[in-house]
Amino acid sequence: MKKRNWNLCNVLSGASGSRVLWQFNPEPRGAKLSGQRQLQGTDKLPADWVNKGLSTLFGQSKLNVAWMRADHVFLRVLKLPTADLSETQSMIELQLEKLSPLAVGQLAWTFEPWGTPVEGLQTVIVIIIERQHVDHLLTALQTSGFLADKLEFPLLRQLAATDFDGDGTWIYLSIDGNPARALAVWHYQGSLQSIHMMHLGDGDSRPQRLFEQLTQTIWAGEVEGWMTQPIQWRLVAPESSLAFWQPQFTAWANVPPRTFPSLQDEELAALTARHAGNMPAEMTVVPPDYTARYRQDLIDRTWMGALFAVAVVYMVAVGCYLAFLEFHRFQLAAAEKQVASLQDNEREYQKFLAKEASFQRQASLQKASIRAFRAAAENLPADLTLTKLNLQNGKMLTLFGTAPADQQRAVTDYADAMGSAIDETGAGKLFASVQPPNSQTRPGAGGQMMVTWNFVCELKTGSDREEKR
């Protein structure tokens, strides 16, 4: 059994009615309160607090813990040989039928190790609750959006915080705020011997019923051999209850009991969060089928949410595309209408003049290109290979070629020769400028190193020729 890895813990004080929701963050010595919500019967739980996300599937767990009331909880004390949690669980299962007041098939149970083992024996408290009540409680919690990982009995956290300073009997009164509920804890011979819940009924007969049940346990303890006299009584209860019960105990036991105020709900919630985070996930009365169902529901919701998001994105993208297409169709129709309105005789005449000028320009460029190509061929050294000529805008002539690696000087000479080429029309140099060649050495066929080169020659334009003259 492994401990939980948690980064948030929500503690809910009940499934219905007036409730309090606390949220805690882990810290080295316990749990730190990060938020608190007071909820009425119809109030919804804050979804951003209790809902679980993808991080839960990848180890960063958010724990949801709900408190159980004492009405349906049975507590038993066992002495077992010291063992790890798994072996202890197996030993309890063998005795469960004897321990439980319910049929084994009708209950949910867990346990808590208690105190320090003595002479090879460990003390454990077994928590038993009716399975039907667990189902009802988990269903009510799920309806409100709270998927509980653990169901906790807060009074056990009160017991865990108690300093059992010697032998004696601790009486916890007004459990869950109910004056008819009490718990007796019998701590003798250095360890927990007995623990049992007591129902005191209603009215003025509560003290009499409490003392009758305590007397029966005293007789049983004497028979079993762990009871010692005189009994040291301790009362743990809210301040308002202590004022009533202290004189009652003093009159009955002939000795005043020591009194201690019970912990506040916020303190119990912090202890609950700390305990839930430190105990393995398997140690809970929440049946495994609920946990598996919660996990599967989370996976299903994640997939459905992802598919819905993809569908929304797809629909938005299609809508944007259709709007964009319609907008361009409108622009195209407007442009076509405008072009049609401008097609008159003057437009045709301007087009004719433009075509004539274009033809003249093309003829001039063709002649210049022929002269440039001829100069490139005539000045090409024998060791250089011209692989490509590229004339852009009728002005920029780029020559590409290859040469053996030891003929890089020939490339430079070729560029210089092109720069000195004379225009056969008598307009001076053919090129206005020739850029230095670019070259790169790389292996050629047969492993011979070759140089690929290129340089740019700028043809003279008509305006260049007029300035020269």
Image (cartoon, rainbow, N blue to C red):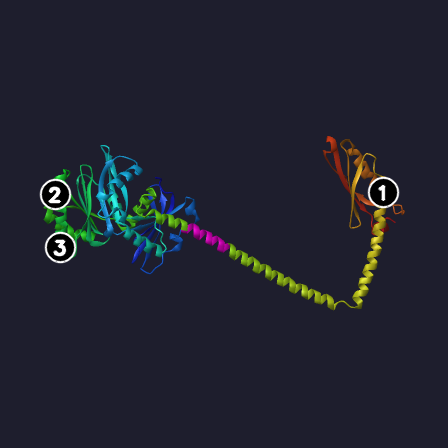
- Residue ID for mark 1: 375
Report the predominant secondary structure element of the magenta stretch. Answer: helix
374 falls in the magenta region: no
The magenta-colored residue range is 297-309
- Residue ID for mark 2: 219
Q: What amino acid is at disc 3? A: Ser
Q: Position of residue 104 (x, y in %)?
A: 26, 46
Visible residue check, residue 113 = no
Instruction: Give the Cα separation between the discs numbered 1 and 3.
Output: 127 Å
Front residue of this view, candidates 239 and 3:
3
Q: Position of residue 219 (x, y in %)?
A: 12, 43
Which SS class for mark 3?
helix
Visible residue check, residue 26 = yes
Give the side of residue 20 with respect to residue 194, left or right: right
- Number of numbered markers: 3
Q: Mark 3 Cα within 10 Å, few/some/many (few <14, many 20+)?
A: few
State which mark lies toward you, 1 or 3: 3
Residue shown at 68% from the left, 66% from the top? 334
User: Of label 1 and label 3, which has the lower sequence position?
Assistant: 3
Q: What amino acid is at disc 2? A: Trp
Numbered tag placed on residue 205 in the rendering: 3
Residue shown at 32% from the left, 48% from the top? 287
User: Of label 1 and label 2, which has the lower sequence position?
Assistant: 2
State which mark lies toward you, 2 or 3: 2
Q: Position of residue 461 (x, y in %)?
A: 82, 50
Front residue of this view, candidates 88 and 381:
88
